[in-house]
Amino acid sequence: MCGIVGYIGKADAASVLISGLKRLEYRGYDSAGLAVIDGDDIVVSKTPGKVAALRDRTRAEWSADRLSRPGIGIAHTRWATHGPPTEANAHPHLDQSGDIALVHNGIIENYRPLRARLEAKGHVFRSDTDTEVLAHLIGDCCKGDLFQAVCDALHQVEGTFGIAVMSAREPGKVITARRGSPILIGVGDGETLIASDASAILSHTQRVIYLDDNDIAVVTADSVDVRDLHNVPVTREIAELEFDGSAAEKGGFEHFMLKEIHEQPECLANATRGRLDHDLGSSVLAGMGTSPRELAELERVVMVGCGTSLHAALVGEYAFEDIADIHAEVHQAAEFRYRNPILGSRDFVVAISQSGETADTLAAVREARQKGAFVMSLCNVVGSTIARETGRGVYLHAGPEISVASTKAFTCQVAVLLMMALKLGRGRRYSREDGGRLAREIARIPELAAEVVRQSEHIAAIAAGYLKDEHAFFIGRGPMYPVALEGALKLKEISYIHAEGYHAAELKHGPIALLTQGTPVIAVACDIPGKDKTLGNVEECRARGARILGIITEGDDEAAEYMDESITVPRAHPLVATIPAVVALQLFAYHVARLRGCEIDQPRNLAKSVTVE
Ligand code: F6R
């Protein structure tokens, strides 16, 4: 979603800001802009479209002197919420005087009454945005002290924000604050950076301070002073980030998505390494932070997440009930707090989020904590808000996921959920022998994924037959049902083909009406319990003229006969088999989208991390 970069130091601010914005491009955006302080003025450059267009425009319109001036600036990539992606709506926004510039992630919910109040005082607005209202409000509060003005303004707003503000009247500092939208401050050598995402600043420094909600900081080139919104100093430690420069490069692949699909064997090895105890037939997940007694006393696992992470949770639901003999539920995170969930101290709430910043999942975490449940997270991004707020959790170790469409995070989420189920199971009724068998199967996961990745060319050849289709159905049952949901999500988000995932039995309760001659049905019919029933459902589709692509188990000639064509995946434990099956569907979606000429890594309208409700 939106991205923020701020800089104050010795280098030329414009080029630092533009290269920071480039590193945020993967998050998804539709316009970009930056502002620097030049002499007594703030100068702004903004444009709809890509950061490259912003760079070209700035180079064309700004003097060489301005472009190379060391100093201070703020910049933004905007994912439109209030008003279309136009130049006027792009950030930074100025206050009424033009002396104060602001970039903002999040949503100011009460912007309408604030705007009306300011208009009554003579303020003139140039955009449709809630952000411009906040810029004017800060200006309106400013009586010569920017820090105090920002505090006063933020006390009046409802909603979420991560902001960076600067004033031509106080040119040596940037004020930054957060509530519900991440901000981190990079502490460099004679320079300080502000960002909504570490990737924007990692090439300058790996030392960062994460702001917590309602923190506000005054940042200069060599100091960071963090306070709360009542101006009381708070202590925030400096954390060291790991920097893997190769993650930001495509490494010879045409797209980040393809690279990340290919990385899965290695990521899955990282996610499982050192976490399986073959002697005890269990797993070692210290981050769960629960004693064996606490685990034994748990009554329920409640998983929350959105999108792909929600689909991983649905696989987890089968795993917890089957392996750990514990009641398991999955909730779409956006609905969780509004339905007033019944939770207690014997409920184990697992928040699943690649980014660790999804607003709805974070809100679900807060609701669960409020109600006294055990809460843990399963995040990929180290130091993300959800990881920090839950305190306990298991990192995926998938490495940075740049492609907007999630791939390696999903498979690592499933692998970690299986290990969690194993650990819980061993604390309950699962025997050492059964545990040992499952641990050995989990250890095979990296190689199972590799076997499917090696079929990329074969899958591309199959995908070539689906380029003209505008609709597709994905079906599965048991743990392959969430795999079908995930396959449909991957195809629709990157190829723009309308794709729906259904439980194989559900099709005949309505959607089968849409099947006509040649409609593609992708049947995830791996050889696990329930396969025969899925094959029966495939027959029903064939009888209506559907064209069937099967995801089937290697050597399963019986299943192959039901399909028009098939992709085979290696035989594995029914829950483990979800991983190779989904890798096949990721590759199918990728190749369909590539052959249709779609912009794969940043699909239209999508954002990598959804930080608004
Ligand atoms: C789809 C996708 C999204 C995310 C969802 C949750 O490919 O990436 O559906 O899974 O926005 O994001 P996280 O996992 O970061 O909470």
Image (spheres, rainbow, N blue to C red):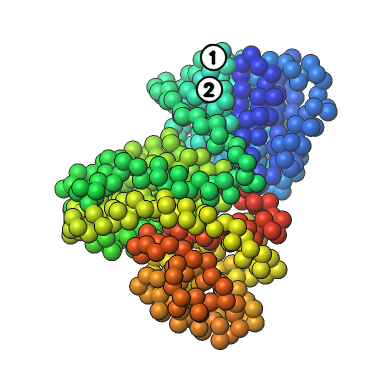
Relative side of 150 to 271, left or right: right
Residue in front for this viewpoint, 525 or 70: 525
Relative side of 586 to 441, left or right: right
Q: Quadrant of the N terminus?
A: top right
Which amino acid lies under the numbered mark 2 shown in the image of this protein? Answer: Thr
Report the residue that reaches farthest toward the left.
293
Q: Give me the disc on residue 205.
A: 2
Task: Kindly identify the residue that appears in the image at 55 percent across and 64 percent down.
Answer: 488
Provide the residue designation for mark 1: 189
Q: Residues within 10 Å of mark 2 (few under 14, many from 20)?
A: some
Q: Residues within 10 Å of mark 1 (few under 14, many from 20)?
A: few
Placement of 602 over or under 538, stated as above or below: above
SS class, disc 2: loop
Q: CA distance from mark 1 to mark 2?
A: 8 Å
Task: Kindly identify the residue that appears in the image at 69 percent across and 24 percent down.
Answer: 15
Query: Is residue 295 among the parts visible in the rendering?
Result: no
Task: Kindly identify the residue that appears in the image at 39 percent across and 64 percent down.
Answer: 571
Residue in front for this viewpoint, 362 or 249: 249
